[in-house]
Image (cartoon, grey):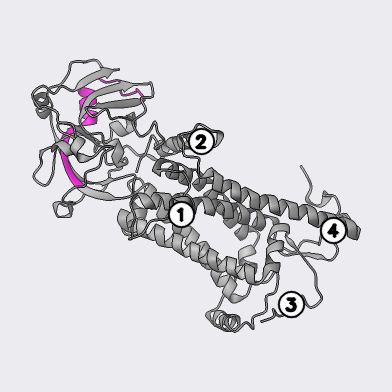
Amino acid sequence: MNHRDSRRSPPSLEPAQQRQLVDVQRRLLLRGSLSLGALAMLSGCNLQDGDSVDRVLWSMSRFNDRVQAWLFSGQRLAPTFAASELTEPFPFNAFYPQYNVPIVGASDYRLEVSGMVQERRPWTLDALRALPQRAQITRHICIEGWSAIGQWRGVPLGDFLKRIGADTSARYVGFQCADRYYTSIDMASALHPQTLLALETGRNLEALPDEYGFPLRLRIPTKLGFKSAKHVTAITVTNTYPGGYWEDQGYNWFSGV
Amino acid sequence: MNNPMSFPGYRRIHAGPVRMTHWLNAGCMLGMFMSGWGIYNASPLFGFTFSHSLTLGGWLGGNIAWHLAIMWVLVINGLGYITWGVLSRHFRHDLLPLSPRAVITDLRAALTFRLAHRLGHYNAVQKLLYLGVIALCVLVVLSGLAIWKPVQFHPLTALLGGFDTARYVHFFAMAGIGLFIAIHLVLVALVPRTLWPMISGRARSRQHEDDHHEPS
């Protein structure tokens, strides 16, 4: 415990010593301005080189995952909108141009299920359509900053996980897609009532068009848009971190909104 | 506030916490501006983008990683400054009171180069600028939270006019802070002897310092 008044008394300096002190302070200022130059060089740090600054950024991103998981409420619903507020046409966005959208056949489509679940049989499209469905009009928020209001209808993921006997104490739900895309979410977000395995979209709720993820996409309004994976072909429940296409390159994993 | 002088012939102008938070804030702001401009470029609100050389992080994922990492340092630093400013009565003594009449008088004097700069004492225009930029910093943080968590912090986002409007609020709060920084740097260039006290905390005592007028 340092007592405030017990600090050493100010030294009285000779003029020459004072000048020396000023010189030292000048050097510190110079060093300060050099570190501004260093900041300019940091702009090369982009999460992709694995240097020490990148490692700090990655660990801050993991810290932000934990903060967001703590902020996330399984009960709080994303705002919903009226049909008159729909964004039409809904923007197309993918990691490839529109002419590379995969065409998935409806009849031979199967949704594979794996990991910590009791029933591992694959699901046909008709079997998925036969499950109780729910619709929502919510805002899709892209990590780029734009947003659009869309309508989706499908099977609540939480209901589906319970139906296949998933261990809901597992940490992750991972998704694999027909376009080599993959992503994963935390179990709390997977069980959120607005998280859907969407089969239909648009004002009239028609089957997903190819560019919006036919035949099945994830729709999760409590996360940024890149988490709503399109053309989902496999779901896995796991405690092993599955990562994601963008997440492995540096997008924040939790990406809650 | 004015501690006994540590050095003969020098007097204390800025307290240690002010200087420390000021320079940490300056570095954080630079990083937030540059990474934020990179994020802006991914989906511009207006018909322009920022030069890639002015951005931090290389690509959108890097921009966001920088922005949300520096965010913590900025907010902790800002909360520290505000807590200290209230507890030490720095705000009450140095930034208040502020009357419209005093602002008009001092602004008129400043624009005709007749306003004295007294080290360690803020005139009404300075008080207005400093209080204004503190308010803008609060607004930039609130609008930032509103677009970071529009579902979890929905009441805040709704208060700012919804997600899309909150993006504009965040942009204009940034632009306002940028304007403050530009004025701030011009004024430091005009009165360079204000720079050293913000680094060392002290300035050479002069006889009749308070009556000294800047050459116009």
For the residues tagged 1 and 4, is the chain the same?
A: no
Please state which of the two labelled residues, at mark 2 or mark 3, is closer to the viewer.
2
Category of crowding for the residue at label 2, using alpha-carbon neighbours closer than 10 angstroms: few (below 14), some (14–19), many (at least 20): many
**Mark 2 vs mark 4, CA separation in Å:** 41 Å
Q: Is residue B180 above or below residue A220?
A: below
**Mark 2 vs mark 3, CA separation in Å:** 50 Å
Which amino acid type is marked by label 1? Val
Q: Chain of mark 2?
A: A
Please provide the residue range marked out in magenta. A150-171
Q: Verify whether residue A130 appears in magenta.
A: no
Residue that numbered label 1 is attached to = B141
**Mark 3 vs mark 4, CA separation in Å:** 25 Å
Sequence-earlier tag: 2 or 4: 4
Q: Is residue A49 above or below residue B56?
A: above
Residue that numbered label 2 is attached to = A54
Instruction: Describe residue A11's horizontal placement relative to residue B60 as left or right.
Output: right
Residue drawn 38% across the image and 36% down it: A254
The kind of secondary structure element at disc 4 is helix
**Mark 2 vs mark 1, CA separation in Å:** 25 Å
For the residues tagged 2 and 1, is the chain the same?
A: no
Residue that numbered label 3 is attached to = B210
Sequence-earlier tag: 1 or 3: 1
Q: Are marks 2 and 1 in contact (CB under 8 Å)?
A: no
Category of crowding for the residue at label 4, using alpha-carbon neighbours closer than 10 angstroms: few (below 14), some (14–19), many (at least 20): few
Which amino acid type is marked by label 2? Asp
For the residues tagged 3 and 4, is the chain the same?
A: no
Instruction: Describe residue B193's horizontal placement relative to residue B8 as left or right.
Output: left
Mark identifier at residue A19 = 4
The kind of secondary structure element at disc 3 is helix
Residue drawn 27% across the image and 41% down it: A221
